[in-house]
Amino acid sequence: MSKLENVPDNIITGKDLDYLCDMFQWNYCAFKKTCNDIEYIDNQEITELFGEISDLFDTNLNTILEIINNPGGEIDE
């Protein structure tokens, strides 16, 4: 039986990076659509909701970038 080697915690595999890229694209696309649609909404309640939603997508984008820039590190919350 061959010995399994330890994988360092501070790396991102190609598969991980593909998944992170997909998550970034989904959130970026949703963020852009939400921000672009806010100007066409007349209802103040919906405008505020879209603002909250775009903030959520922005937070997700920054979290993904933190993971990519600091693999295996602590994420500031």
Image: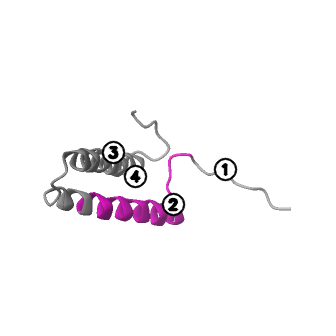
Q: Earlier in the sequence, mark 1 or mark 2?
A: 1
Q: Earlier in the sequence, mark 4 or mark 3?
A: 3
Q: Secondary structure at mark 4?
A: helix
Residue 14 counted in the magenta span: yes
Q: Secondary structure at mark 1?
A: loop
Q: Secondary structure at mark 3?
A: helix
The residue pinned by badge 4 equals 68
Q: Secondary structure at mark 2?
A: helix
At horizontal 39% and vertical 51% (from top left) the residue drawn is: 64
Q: Is residue 30 left or right of residue 70?
A: left
Q: Nearer the viewer, residue 10 or 46?
A: 46
| Image quadrant occupied by the C terminus | top left
How far apart are the two marked residues, 2 and 4, measured between alpha carbons?
Answer: 10 Å
Residue numbers of the magenta segment: 9-32
Where is residue 75? Give x, y as percent.
Answer: 43, 37
How far apart are the two marked residues, 3 and 1, measured between alpha carbons?
Answer: 32 Å
The residue pinned by badge 3 equals 59
Contact, mark 1 vs mark 2 (Cβ under 8 Å)? no
| Amino acid at the residue labelled 4 | Ile
Question: Extreme top residue here?
Answer: 77
The residue pinned by badge 1 equals 6
Where is residue 70? Give x, y as percent.
Answer: 40, 45
How far apart are the two marked residues, 4 and 3, measured between alpha carbons?
Answer: 14 Å
| Image quadrant occupied by the N terminus | bottom right
Q: Earlier in the sequence, mark 2 or mark 4?
A: 2
- Colour scheme in the image? one colour
The residue pinned by badge 2 equals 16
At horizontal 56% and vertical 46% (from top left) the residue drawn is: 9
